[in-house]
Image (cartoon, rainbow, N blue to C red):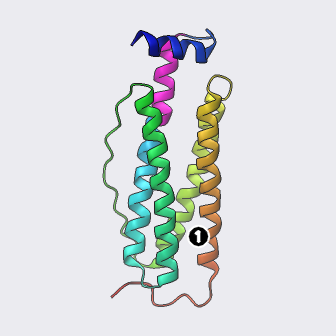
Amino acid sequence: MLLNVNWLAYLLGGNSSTDDARDRILEVLGHRYVRECQHVMRFRQHAERIADPQVRETLLRIAAKEAEHVRWIEEKITGFGGKLPKVIDSHCTHEDAWAYLRSDLDEERRCVAEIEDDKENLQSDFPDIVRLLDRIEADAEKNSQEIRALLLRRDFPVPWAA
């Protein structure tokens, strides 16, 4: 444990207490972990409910990328000696595929805003965590563009799988 404390103290450059810094990192990463896990569930659930194969494939690809984010964050949390937070299943009950896609777009926008706040809080002390958040944010912005493109399609078929 002493080695981990010394490493974290080195990382911080002695600017704040090691325990406070660790708690701050774990709080941000824990929240992001829960949100990314929920995104995976959400996109998979939506993909299952949409009949169009192209839309389904896009949502499953986004879910896979979100699952990659979960793994990255999990590595950081465990690397700091933290425990993974419990994730509560989330289920959406929209009436049609358009509503699901609109809610997915809104969720990705919220994700970007949350990450911006997290990065601002960690910027000077934790550049490696900020770089991780930058990668996740870039993916969220790409996801938003893909979902927006799906919403703009004019040939969107019957929304639900049989």
Front-most of residues 30 and 10: 10
* Residue 90 position within the rendered picture, expressed as x and y whole percent measured from the top left: 34, 57
Q: Residue at x 64, y 41 (%)?
A: 116
Query: Which residue position holds label 1?
Result: 147
Residue 41 lies left or right of residue 6; in this view the side is left
In the image, is 126 to the left or to the right of 36? right
- The amino acid pointed to by label 1 is Ile
Instruction: Estimate the x, y position of residue 117 in percent, counting from the top left.
Output: 62, 37
Q: Is residue 119 above or below residue 5?
A: below
Check residue 18 for magenta coloring.
yes
**Which residue is rendered at x = 39% and y = 13% of the image?**
1
- Comparing 53 with 71, the one in front is 71
Residue at (61% x, 26% y) in the render: 126
Q: Quadrant of residue 79?
A: top left
Residue 69, position in %: x, y? 50, 49
Q: What residue range appears in magenta?
A: 17-29
Looking at the rendering, in which quadrant would you find the C terminus? bottom left
Q: Residue at x 50, y 24 (%)?
A: 24
Looking at the image, residue 136 lies above or below residue 56: above
Question: Which secondary structure type mostly characterizes the magenta part of the structure?
Answer: helix
In the image, residue 27 sits, relative to residue 133, either above or below, namely above
In the shown orientation, is residue 52 left or right of residue 82? right
Q: Outermost residue toward the right?
A: 124
Quadrant assignment, res 102? bottom right
Expressed as whole percent of the image width and height from the top left, the position of residue 27 reads 46, 30
How packed mark 1 is, by other alpha carbons closer than 10 Å (few <14, some 14-19, many 20 or more), is many
Could you say whether the residue bearing mark 1 is in a helix, strand or loop?
helix
Q: For this rendering, which residue is in front, 103 or 116?
A: 116
Q: Is residue 1 magenta?
A: no
